């Protein structure tokens, strides 16, 4: 196999007819699928040859020859010294004159090599392959290109940015990847701009995206590759401060992503995958740039709240609930939309009020536990005790933000037992300490809730039937005896490290309970609240 690969590469360096070129490249594509047969294809000379047939201009092979062989190439350095300069300096054919089948096979071969060989990835970086790829992406308007060529140019870009951090940074910064790929996505979806940050499908400007015909499978496939590349190169955008120019680029991209979110694909599975990639990328945008999701004007069929277009927020909510219902790989499929909704609600008052009206409507049912039922609130509260810590924390954070980070309100909708995890992590177990900077709006409680409020068990969040007092009829001495038995049991279990008794400190965090604390609890079991009476319900929003 190795010898066959070397022979084929040598043939490709000759002047061949397109049919011979195609046969050789098909052979390379098949051989390059095997990670144990990568040797003949990972030299600078071989990669330059394949890049030539892929229509990619390589610029630094001469410098690499002077630097010596790449690690792992062995004696290939001499071969590279003799042949790579000629191939690298040979001008690549104009992209529009390439034989498309030859072009596609070369692109597939390079993709296989990158996927299976770390040395091949190093060589691709040495040859600045991404620069040639960026030039091809700029030529997206060439009408002769078929879908296969366009797809594998994008797939090659995705692999380069996924496998090499340096290439990812080069495309994002030096080659202005966000703008380049944003324009590619815009052309793929055939968009036009009807306002500064509002898009529409060209020729259908007056029709809302939800009412447009589904996008074709080929459009979706190309769009998803672009979305994946953009995800790679924007991965750190939330972790750093962006300047005004970058923020403008991200807002421009966000407007296109809003259109993606409201568009549909031909087929439920494909549509779900398309929206998943869109949501993933939206989660990478700097939080202040998410305001583009609510900027478009309200139309006749729009979902509207307080005069603001909530189509995107409504679609995100539907997507999130669909992922909860599917229940498959929640960490990968649910968290992007959940985090995106949380950040949108945190910074945008109207979005928070809209989401709250959908997720936490005024309480009427007080006989069922918050985690029991089929409403979206019930589903999210169930997730607050999920086995996966990330899922549990994100679900609790979303509901906490919808409650304006108000502890009493959070407990009201979820029950103290479900809320305890988040509250303990934040040192908020003592009710009355609130976080966040939110507006003071009043909430009107339902009559059902007002009538039952005094009888609601704050731990479970529901009205429970009265239970008999287990200490009824016991004398004070008998009660103290039973209490001491309980203390001794706790002490024995803690000494053997079976449990660690804890108690709530004055700062709202949990601390270890000593034997002295346990004895004190038997004599003064009721902890008096030192906080003022809670006036939360007077300033809760709708």
Image (tube, rainbow, N blue to C red):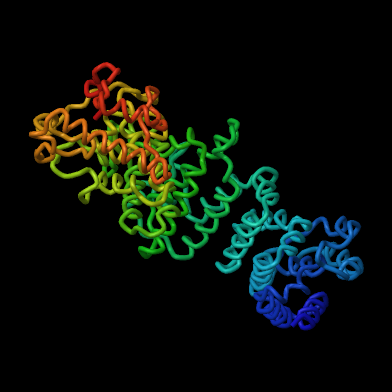
Q: Nearer the viewer, residue 260 or 442?
A: 442
Q: Residue 316 vs residue 283: left or right?
A: left
Who's the residue at 79% across and 82% down the image?
3
Q: Residue 385 vs residue 28: left or right?
A: left
Q: For residue 9, which quarter of the picture?
A: bottom right
Q: Is residue 37 visible?
A: yes
Residue 479 at x, y percent in the picture: 17, 32
Q: Is residue 519 above or below residue 282?
A: above
Who's the residue at 41% across and 41% down the image?
495
Q: Nearer the viewer, residue 32 or 370?
A: 370
Q: Nearer the viewer, residue 3 or 452?
A: 452
Number of dots carrying numbers: 0
Who's the residue at 13% across and 35% down the image?
471
Q: For residue 10, which quarter of the picture?
A: bottom right
Residue 452 at x, y percent in the picture: 11, 33
Q: Is residue 205 above or below residue 4?
A: above
Q: Nearer the viewer, residue 475 or 348?
A: 475
Q: Quadrant of the C terminus?
A: top left
Residue 85 at x, y percent in the picture: 88, 64
Q: Quadrant of the N terminus?
A: bottom right
Q: Is residue 508 above or below residue 463?
A: above
Q: Residue 117 vs residue 141: left or right?
A: right
Residue 364 at x, y percent in the picture: 14, 38
Q: Is residue 405 visible?
A: no
């Amino acid at each position: 196999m190795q010898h066959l690969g070397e022979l084929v590469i040598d043939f490709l360096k000759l002047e061949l007819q397109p049919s011979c070129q195609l046969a050789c490249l098909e052979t390379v594509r098949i051989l390059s699928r095997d990670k144990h047969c990568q040797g003949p294809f990972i030299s600078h000379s071989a990669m330059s040859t394949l890049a030539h047939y892929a229509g990619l201009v390589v610029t630094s092979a001469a410098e690499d020859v002077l630097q010596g062989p790449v690690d792992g190439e062995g004696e290939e350095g001499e071969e590279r010294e003799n042949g790579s300069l000629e191939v690298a300096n040979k001008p690549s054919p104009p992209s529009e004159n390439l034989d498309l089948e030859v072009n596609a096979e070369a692109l597939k071969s390079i993709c296989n090599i990158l996927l299976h060989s770390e040395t091949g990835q190093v060589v691709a970086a040495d040859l600045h392959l991404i620069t040639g790829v960026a030039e091809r992406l700029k030529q997206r308007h060439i009408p002769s290109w078929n879908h296969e060529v366009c797809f594998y140019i994008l797939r090659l870009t995705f692999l380069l940015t996924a496998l090499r951090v340096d290439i990812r940074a080069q495309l994002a910064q030096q080659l202005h990847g966000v703008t380049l790929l944003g324009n590619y996505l815009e052309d793929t979806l055939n968009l036009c701009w009807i306002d500064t940050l509002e898009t529409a499908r060209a020729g259908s400007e007056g029709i809302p995206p939800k009412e447009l015909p589904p996008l074709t499978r080929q459009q979706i496939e190309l769009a998803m590759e672009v979305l994946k590349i953009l995800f790679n190169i924007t991965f750190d955008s939330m972790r750093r401060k962006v300047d005004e120019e970058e923020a403008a680029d991200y807002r421009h991209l966000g407007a296109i992503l809003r259109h993606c979110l409201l568009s549909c694909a031909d087929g439920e599975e494909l549509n779900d995958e398309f929206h998943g990639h869109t949501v993933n990328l939206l989660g990478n945008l700097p939080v202040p740039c998410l305001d583009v999701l609510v900027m478009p004007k309200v139309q006749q069929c729009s979902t509207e709240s307080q005069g603001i277009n909530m189509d995107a927020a409504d679609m995100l909510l539907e997507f999130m609930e669909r992922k909860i219902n599917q229940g498959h790989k929640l960490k990968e499929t649910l968290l992007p939309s959940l985090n995106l909704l949380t950040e949108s609600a945190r910074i945008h008052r109207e979005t928070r009020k809209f989401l709250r009206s959908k997720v936490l409507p005024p309480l009427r049912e007080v006989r069922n536990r918050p985690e029991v039922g089929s409403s979206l609130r019930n589903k999210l509260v169930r997730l607050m005790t999920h086995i996966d810590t990330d899922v549990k924390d994100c679900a609790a954070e979303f509901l906490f933000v919808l409650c304006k980070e108000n502890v009493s309100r959070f407990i009201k909708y979820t029950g103290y037992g479900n809320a305890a995890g988040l509250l303990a992590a934040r040192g908020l177990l003592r009710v009355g300490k609130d976080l966040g900077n939110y507006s003071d709006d009043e909430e009107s409680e339902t009559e059902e809730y007002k009538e039952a409020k005094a009888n609601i068990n704050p731990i479970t969040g529901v009205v429970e039937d009265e239970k008999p007092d287990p200490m009824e009829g016991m004398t004070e001495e008998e009660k103290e005896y039973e209490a001491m038995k309980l203390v001794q049991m706790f002490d024995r279990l803690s000494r053997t490290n079976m449990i660690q008794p804890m108690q709530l400190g004055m700062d709202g965090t949990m601390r270890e309970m000593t034997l002295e604390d346990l004895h004190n609890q038997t004599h003064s079991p009721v902890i008096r609240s030192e906080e003022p009476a809670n006036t939360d319900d007077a300033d809760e929003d709708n």
